[in-house]
Image: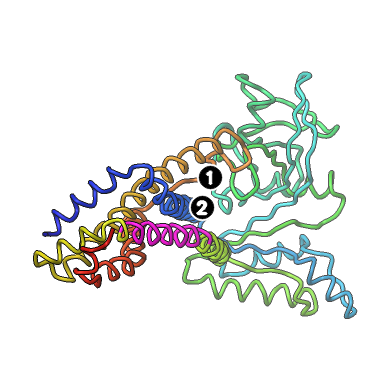
Amino acid sequence: MGTLESLWVAIDTLRTHKLRSFLTMLGVIFGVMAVVVMVALIEGARSSVVSEFEKLGSDVILIAFDPSERIRREERGGTVEGLKLVDLEAIRKLPELRAVAAERQLGEKEFIYQGEKVRANLIGVNEEYLTARALEIEQGRFFEPFEIEQGDKLLVLGYDTAQKLFGKKDPIGQSVLVDGTQAQVIGVLKKRGRGFGENLDEGAYIPLQAALRRWAGDESLTMIMAMPHTRAQTPAAMDAIWETLMRLHNNQPVFRVDTLESIVSAITRGISLFGVLLGGIAGLALLVGGIGIMNIMLVSVTERTREIGLRKAVGAQKWHILTQFLIESATLATIGGLIGMATGWGLGELIEFATKQTDAFGDNGLSFYFPLWAGVGAFLFSASVGVVFGLYPAWRAANLDPIVALRYE
């Protein structure tokens, strides 16, 4: 019996025992489905993270205060309050950098325009903020350097904030009451969307000095973002920034100086570790499916003992019997794997569609990306499960004594 004929016999056997075959395949179906969903969501998350960081540029250096390190330093007798305006001015003088931006988060404030009230995050920024954040102006303009220094009461709105406050009206030149203070709108940012737990479209931006003098009452900064002239200069720029901070703060290492590239690497490593954990769970489901295949193939060998004896009596070799039963078990697992892949793909698309309807996972929801290599791998793996777990039943069938088999009732 040739391979193709054995395949048709295997399919015919599955068709004869439809319910039994389907129940046997359930383990493989659920296992492969879990693998498909896991791989697709992990790959989708990885690609989403990478694309979000690519929008900002991997050469952006983030400088932030580390409060956990401050606590440890206080226990040893040293205190640093955080990033200050003096740190920004010192970093801006470094020749390794082409742009240095700063922000001061002021929290959620109330914005009022002609009786319309909107709550949005108020952020103080300097003139290079657009460059560091890779933002663009939709209407109007951004702050000029002298407006930043003077702390003028000006306002640039995120896209969603402008839509909520003004609707179809032109916001440029309009006065808005911000937490009890009048400010003039001079610009609106292009729509950006949600990313990394924040939505820049729902923010509102004021000159940095206005944020520090009029709202905060101090010179503390939330974050500084720096960009070197070239990506190759990033390590040297980071070293220069660190040395500057240490000089200004008596060598107290209470700051974090990281690149977006290193942050995305850490995130993708975490995603990969999570994927390994999910893969282990999916592997258990496939193991259960493989045991089910072994069990049903052993039953099949018992049921077809006389058939095996007859085939051996007319000249079939051991490897003929072995091949036939291996093909049957592989066919069982492969069909289950194909059903599992189709079900997993459909479930993943459903998850992506459902999460797009909420804001919990951003505008694009949970991305579902199933690469070709994963499909080929799932197909081969499901087939290999059938071969591995069908090996013992096939070996047992191939080694039956033909005389004993013919006498079997």
The reply, left or right, for residue 323 in relation to residue 164 is left
Q: Specify the segment rendered in magenta.
A: 281-300
Principal secondary structure, stretch drawn in magenta: helix
Q: In this picture, is 13 found above or below 324?
A: above
| Residue contact at pointers 2 and 1, CB within 8 angstroms | yes
Q: In this picture, is 227 found above or below 178?
A: below
Quadrant of image for the N terminus: bottom left
Q: Residue at x 75, y 40 (%)?
A: 152
Q: How many discs appear?
A: 2
Per the image, the residue denoted by label 1 is 366
The mark nearer the N terminus, 2 or 1, is 2
Q: Residue at x 24, y 48 (%)?
A: 11
Q: Give SS at disc 1.
A: loop
The quarter of the picture where residue 88 lies is bottom right
The reply, left or right, for residue 352 in relation to residue 403 is right
Residue 366 image offset from top left, x and y in percent: 53, 45
The quarter of the picture where residue 6 lies is bottom left
Q: Is residue 341 visible?
A: yes
Looking at this view, is 233 or 107 the one in front?
107
**Magenta stretch encompasses residue 292:** yes
Q: Residues within 10 Å of mark 2 (few under 14, many from 20)?
A: many
What's the amino acid at mark 2? Ala
Quadrant of image for the C terminus: bottom left
Per the image, the residue denoted by label 2 is 45
The reply, left or right, for residue 351 in relation to residue 317 is right
